[in-house]
Image (cartoon, rainbow, N blue to C red):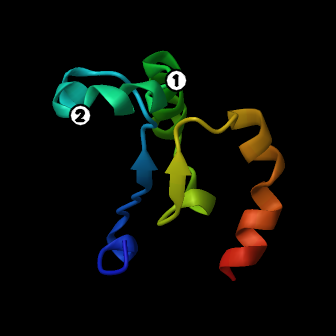
Amino acid sequence: MAEYSEQGVLAYAVHLGAIAMDLAAGMPQEMMHILIDMLEIALHTIVWLVGERREWLGGQYVSCQWDVDELLAKRQEIVDGIN
């Protein structure tokens, strides 16, 4: 975004969470207990992010395990922190 936001590029740094997927198969077995997040919640967040342009979140870190309603409630706080 730093280089192309003036051309309309909107990007987020997205963390899907600790989800037990094929990629985690190489993890040591004793670490598997930390994979507690749900793929469905991450997918919901991604759909929400791309459903409309959210300029106020552009260039920000977004955890897909955050409650979207809580995130929306903090919108002004996030915007004020950016400026």
Where does the image place residue 4, in percent across and percent down from the top left?
30, 74
Kindly identify which residue carries mark 2: 27
Quick one: quadrant of the N terminus? bottom left
- Marks 2 & 1, CB-CB < 8 Å contact: no
Relative side of 33 to 30, left or right = right
Query: Nearer the observer, disc 2 or disc 1?
Result: 2
Q: Residue drawn 47% across and 66% down?
A: 59
Q: Secondary structure at mark 1?
A: helix
Quadrant of residue 11 within the rendered picture? bottom left
Relative side of 27 to 63, left or right = left
Relative side of 39 to 64, left or right = left
Where does the image place residue 67, in percent across and percent down from the top left?
70, 34
Q: Secondary structure at mark 2?
A: loop
Where does the image place residue 6, in percent across and percent down from the top left?
38, 76
Q: Residue drawn 37% across and 26% down?
A: 32
Residue 44: image tag? 1
Q: Nearer the viewer, residue 3 or 37?
A: 37
Q: Nearer the viewer, residue 53 or 18?
A: 18
22 is higher (above) or lower (below) than 49: above
Quadrant of residue 9 within the rendered picture? bottom left
23 is higher (above) or lower (below) than 61: above
Farthest residue in the left direction?
26
Farthest residue in the front direction?
30
Quadrant of residue 43 within the rendered picture? top left
Q: Residue drawn 16% across and 31% down?
A: 26
Q: Residue drawn 20% across and 30% down?
A: 23
Query: Sequence order check: which comes first, mark 2 or mark 1?
Result: 2
Quick one: quadrant of the C terminus? bottom right
Residue type, numbered disc 1: His
Residue type, numbered disc 2: Met
Q: Nearer the viewer, residue 62 or 82?
A: 62
